[in-house]
Image (cartoon, grey):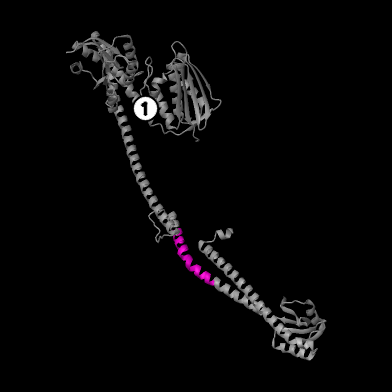
Amino acid sequence: MHHFNKVLLVDDDAATNFLAELAFRNLAIANEIQVASDGFVACELLKQNSCPDIIFLDIRMPRMDGFDFLESLNELNMCKHVKVVMLTSSTRMEDKARALSYNAVVEYLEKPLTEDIIQKIADTYF
Amino acid sequence: MTAFKNYSIKNKLIIIQTTTAFIVVLVCCIFFVLNDIRTFKDSAKRKMYSLTRIVGENAVPTLVFLDQDAATQILMKLNKEPDIALASIFDKNGRLFARYSRQSLSNDSVRMAYIKKPATPEFEGRRLVINYPLYQDSAFVGTVVLRAELNDLDKIIIGYIIVAGLVLVAAIIACLIISGFLQRSIVYRLLRLVSKTKEVAKTGNYALRVDGTGDDEIGVLADGFNTMLIQIEKMEKFLKETNESLKNYSTTLERTNRELEEFAYISSHDMKSPITSLHGMLTLMQQKNAIKPEHQQLFDLAFNSATQMRKTIHALNEIIAFRKTLKIEREKINLAEALEEVKLRIYDMIVSSGAQITANFSECPFVNYPAVHLKSIFQNLLTNAIKYKQEGRAPVIDIKTTKQENFVVLEVRDRGLGIDMSRYKDKLFGLFQRFHTHTEGMGIGLHMIHSIVESYGGKILMESEVNRGTTFKIYLGNAPL
């Protein structure tokens, strides 16, 4: 199974981030796990650190939402090869369609993130 | 002329045709009468001339032989000519030689006729006079003078006038009858068109049609009228259908909207009680120290999630309740008094932040608005300005009102954190949208203000610069009460 060097979790709900981080730790599949409380924090993190292998991204967040974050990635020309998995509570079709229109986005998933899903993603995309 | 304009087409046509016919017949009559009179006079002249010549030729020997009796005898033969009133012969010296007159006349008046000497017959009114010189072997021997009284001329003229008058009357009667018949083919159809137009206008029944069309202008008019009616009928049908479907659509929309409101109300309401219980239980667990230290972090996360959910559901309930209030009637509000009341409500917040609030309502001290909503606008803007103040500085808030057309413009300016308009322009008034995370907030204040302002026919303009502050221009629809 693929071993992630770095994983970035972006969600304003601390519990979601905690559960996702826990799943990764249980699988012992990532060297480093970074957490950002919104798109803005995530952007700042990416500017200062190396790119992660994969980003788990929420849509509705204060200050900078998931879509704005994806726009910023394109605008700033950062982390061109990163894979983004949308992890959201939004079941709106237009949100899904819009998210998948970005090249970086590979999956659109509903919360919560479980160990099974992480394994599946690792097998499919890496 | 204006009276003529208002006559019916039928009468106009009759008047025009009759007048035209009258003028034509009149001109013809005048021409014929004048021509006949001239012909009559010419023939009278010719007759007079021949008569004079014959009398003169016969009278030459009597003059030569100075035989006055013979001359008189010649003249007397003229009594067979009823028109000849006077005939006389003068010798070469101009002395009266012989005379004949139908009435007794003095010699002087006979002489007067001689003096005039017209060589050819000439009219003096109804009199025709001629002086005919007589020659014997080129020697002047005397003159014959004849005078005719054409008494028949008057009779003839009167006769002509009577005939002309009769012809005119006959012509007018004939014209009236003929035009009365002919104009039917025009006027009758026009009148039918007019009555149909009136009927359509009165009943609004566009299914009516004009019949009896033809190839003339009235036919074209009738065809055009029918075509227009067909188009109007189609358009009316289309409008009715569209209207009907719009009505249905609006009913469906209304029902859907009601159902959605009901759904939002029930779901947020039904979620309220379990989350309140859950939150209460978690609070109780914390108070009872029921959490093992190694599980404290997990518990905190769960507790925070529950708290967040409780707030969200509470805010949802608030919004749903608020939306139902957007139909409140307007009242005349003293802006200064309303502001003072709101300041009192958030007194603690103002005092603890040291906020300086100045207000200038001198240009427009009143507004017609629902009081509860105006106060809600004031409260949200003031609490926002205080919450999002610059670090370490007391908030400064300036409020003023101006009048613009049908709006009272409420301008609220702060010198706080400001909002990055280039990023958030489209999200400013969205529900649960937050642009700063360092303080408590649900992201419903601007959404509520926006809903209020829009539902009372206004708008919000906003200028903001990060770390410089924000200016709200609230256009309050100031409809009369």
Position in image of residue A105 (x %, y %): 26, 20
The residue at which mark 1 appears reads as B319
Q: Quadrant of residue B137?
A: bottom right
Position in image of residue B45 (x %, y %): 68, 78
Q: Residue at x 78, y 76 (%)?
A: B116
- Please give the chain letter of the residue carrying mark 1: B
Between A1 and B84, which is closer to the camera in this rendering? Answer: B84
Q: Which residues are magenta?
A: B173-195
Find out whether residue B175 is within the magenta segment: yes
Position in image of residue A74 (x %, y %): 32, 18
Looking at the rendered structure, the kind of residue marked 1 is Ile
Q: Residues within 10 Å of mark 1 (few under 14, many from 20)?
A: some
Q: Quadrant of residue B451?
A: top left
Q: Is residue B409 left or right of residue B262?
A: right
A97 over B121 or under it: above or below: above
B329 over B347 or under it: above or below: below
Element at label 1: helix
